[in-house]
Amino acid sequence: MDNPSSPPSPSDFGSQLSAALPPSPPRNVVFFNERGLRAGWRILIFILLVVSISISLSAIVRKIHHPAHTAGFPTPGQMIFQEAMSFAILFVCALIMSRIEKRSPGVYGLPAASVFGKNFWLGMLLGLAEVSVLIGLIAAFGGYSFGGLALTGSAILRWGLIHLLLFTLVGFFEEFAFRGYLQYTLADGIGFWPAAILLSLGFGAVHLTNPGEGPVGAASVALVGLFFAFTLYRTGNLWYAVGLHASFDWGETFLYSVPNSGMVMDGHLSNSLLHGPKWLTGASVGPEGSVFCFVTMALQFLVVMWLFPKRKETSGSPVTASERAA
């Protein structure tokens, strides 16, 4: 009597099943690539989410509260609300996209494991150091005077904390807007540095809408955007950039009481003066329009290269740094 044949192996069974089933329809190359939905469509969905949620929330806020019209730009209190709401909208939309894309939201630059960790505080320290060196160089050439105190007593602490909160929120909003979800996704489509250059140019262009801003200041802001992208590339997340962004703006606006991208805000510490040629002081733009701003940024690039040595990539993806930090 013949021996019964052995049962088919799992691999043979899988091959027979695949042959029996109809082939899967090919993906539409206009919408999909080998990594899933193409970057351009994901960015479009993200922007539509941001716009729709922003319009809805604005309508709700106007219905609940009717702010009186005021001349000039908003007060620090109004700006705190605006920056907090703007960041919240962006972050919620990124969370939605992370569910759609089946990714950890931390890959977009703000991993929870690093929240307010060493990189954030290191950025805060070096941002304050940078603005101090910048103001010191301007003062050394006779372009800056601290002047008398504009605040006294408890008002110094109160306004110092108000500005610190405001510019921490500015750091979160601007860094996540230009180097968060959009940087990650655009880099997936065209590469990290082409994405960083495009978004940094946009970063500079947006600042042209500030009162008193000019082309030199906007160029400086665009270069700052590239520097912040470089910190993302080297550190793997945005925490260093957020801290540095916050403390630099706080130093300009409150501590040294000079224009910040063309804006002079309420609650500054002193009645400081910028005097001298525009190339030295930045004039109405503030120190960001000074030639010395390019010098201090170059020093910051060197500092980041020293603090965060280049790491070997473990993947060909242009966004592996963020994924490693998530």
Image (tube, rainbow, N blue to C red):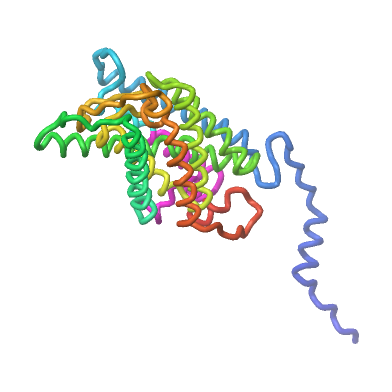
Q: Nearer the viewer, residue 296 or 227?
A: 296
Q: Does 158 sit above or below residue 67?
A: below
The answer to whether one can see residue 49 in this image is: no
Residue visible at 40% across and 36% down in the picture = 173
Q: Residue 268 appears in which quarter of the rendering?
A: top left
Q: Is residue 99 magenta?
A: yes
Left or right: residue 135 versus residue 307 is left
Left or right: residue 284 versus residue 216 is left
Q: Nearer the viewer, residue 284 or 171?
A: 284
Q: Main secondary structure of the magenta part?
A: helix
Give percent across and percent down for residue 127: 36, 44
Give percent across and percent down for residue 270: 20, 31
Q: Name the residue furthest bottom.
A: 1
Q: Name the residue furthest right.
A: 1
Residue visible at 81% across and 54% down in the picture = 20
Which residues are drawn in magenta? 87-115
Q: Name the residue furthest front.
A: 141
Give percent across and percent down for residue 206: 47, 25
The answer to whether one can see residue 306 in this image is: yes
Left or right: residue 279 versus residue 182 is left
Q: Nearer the viewer, residue 290 or 182?
A: 290
Q: Is residue 138 magenta?
A: no
Q: Residue 184 appears in which quarter of the rendering?
A: top right
Locate the N terminus and report the quarter of the image it occupies: bottom right
Give percent across and percent down for residue 272: 24, 28
Residue visible at 35% across and 55% down in the picture = 117
Residue visible at 49% across and 47% down in the picture = 301
